[in-house]
Amino acid sequence: MTVIKIPLRKKLALNLFKKYKANETKIHRLNYLVWECTLRCNLNCLHCGSDCKKESSVKDMPAADFLKAVDEIIPIVNPNKTTVVFTGGEVLVRKDIEKVGIELYKRGFPWGIVTNGMLLNEKRLTSLLNSGLRSITVSIDGFEEAHNWLRNNKNSFKNAVNAIKLITKADNLVYDVVTCVNRKNYSNLAVFRDFLIDAGITAWRIFTVFPIGRAKINDDLQLSPEEFKGLFDFIKQTRREKKIKLNYGCEGFLGNYEGDVRDNFFFCRAGINIGSILADGSISACPNLRDNFIQGNIYNDNFADVWENRYQKFRNRSWTKTGICADCDFYGYCEGNGLHLRDEKTDELLFCHLKRIEEGENIEKATK
């Protein structure tokens, strides 16, 4: 049981937000669709949660199959308010992204991509923009040594920097840079922040690595408790300075840091507002949720019917009140953490943000 205390005013705000989450869950309006368009990748990242490879055993889904599934959900969504995001693998290894993008544009769906930047040049970006691209996220994980170590490629930093130079010059494009914080880049966060500001980046998103996928076997990917707490102090201070819009990722209830390190309180929207179509046609929510979180398959099921009538595991999370969650005072706000942090065989929680923050606070107090 955590001993972290939350001030009364913040607790009142959290209780109001809890009611909002319950209403959102009841309505479960799909407004964010992720397409895992490929499992092929031109990098071999140490922290990859999908275990992507240059040549994947799962073939790329034909564009027509994905568009058929999109057409199935049109009756239950407002296309103008439903963003489609292409992810992978590395999205840009596919040559037909523009073709799919144009078809989404015709249907009224705004669309975007997540990329490592290796294949993004001026010609390709122009082609994407002409096909209706509205948003882009580029991954860059610190300076050259740290970034290339994580991405396992000596040219990855150079290409990622070239990519962010391109996106800052593009008109009518929503963008952000996302950084995976780990033990290799933690000490340089403040300098790296200033580097991004000087490069013209206005939106930055940080996430931390958890023990899933390849990240299970490398201790350098995991922050210590002191570093974990220190990260949120850094984010909080950066947000106060307002020189760059910085948000921590969507996963994990953060106790007293709620409201201070991202624009919204913690809310795992997987299966509530977020749906996904994986490379093999499986229907899920966040692409990190596989195996026993799969709700159907576009080759056997109507996507709209699945969205409306399944996803019970996402919308009623009482099954997560086990293990360390069972007697936690903050379960009502957290509801078992991000679902991608639960063991897909036992349902037990693999990582608790609040517990790690508390460990960091205790170490900090003991050393004063």
Image (cartoon, grey):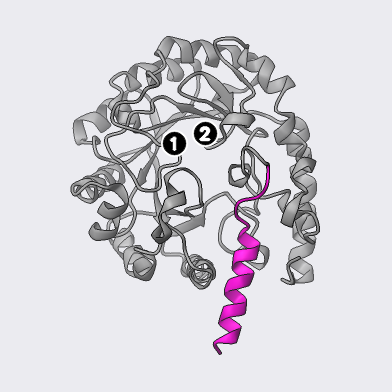
Q: Position of residue 16 (x, y in %)?
A: 79, 53
Q: Residue at x 51, y 69 (%)?
A: 240
Task: Please indicate whether residue 29 sits to the left or right of residue 110 in the image.
Answer: right
Quadrant containing the C terminus in the rendered view: bottom right
For label 2, the residue is: 287
**Majority secondary structure of magenta residues:** helix
Residue that sits furthest to the bottom in the current view: 368
Q: Position of residue 82 (x, y in %)?
A: 56, 28
For label 1, the residue is: 50
Q: Residue at x 39, y 61 (%)?
A: 220
* Disc nearest the viewer among 2 and 1: 1
Verify whether residue 114 appears in magenta.
no
Q: Position of residue 194 (x, y in %)?
A: 33, 66
Q: In terms of depth relative to the viewer, which is nearer, 328 or 73?
A: 328
Span highlighted in magenta in the image: 347-368
Nearer-N-terminus badge (2/1): 1
